[in-house]
Amino acid sequence: MQQVRWRPGSGSCRAKRSNLLLWWMCICPVTTISALANRISLGDVDAPDFAARSCDEIGRLAESLSRMRRSLVQAIRMLEA
């Protein structure tokens, strides 16, 4: 039976891949949604919807923000009429 030896740097590579995956799956979408919410809060109701790629919590958050933006646009139109 061959003994597995520890190789320097192998854990570092896994950590980098994990960080990249975390950034791609969580941090990037949350940052984008946050920027979109900021634009809407400053009155830019023409900001585009965030295209949710998933049905998880981040996807539901994006859908909720889009629904809130559409409701805000509708309320503004009703007030202007």
Image (tube, helix red, strand yellow):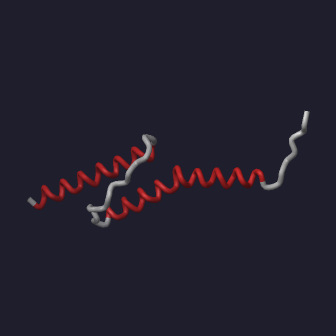
Q: Position of residue 41 (x, y in %)?
A: 32, 62
Q: Position of residue 3 (x, y in %)?
A: 90, 39
Residue reaching furthest left? 81
Q: Which residue lies at the image location 45% right of the left edge and 41% below the top edge?
A: 56
Q: Which residue lies at the image location 42% right of the left edge and 45% below the top edge?
A: 59
State the count of labels: 0
* Image quadrant in which the C terminus is located: bottom left
Specify whether 14 is left or right of 69: right
Q: Which residue lies at the image location 75% right of the left edge and 51% below the top edge?
A: 11
Q: Position of residue 8 (x, y in %)?
A: 82, 54
Specify whether 15 is left or right of 38: right
- Seen from the viewer's position, the closer of residues 33 and 4 is 4
Q: Which residue lies at the image location 39% right of the left edge and 44% below the top edge?
A: 60
* Image quadrant in which the N terminus is located: top right
Q: Position of residue 79 (x, y in %)?
A: 13, 58
Specify whether 75 is left or right of 69: left
Residue reaching furthest top? 1
User: Dividing the picture into quarters, in which one does residue 33 lie?
Assistant: bottom left
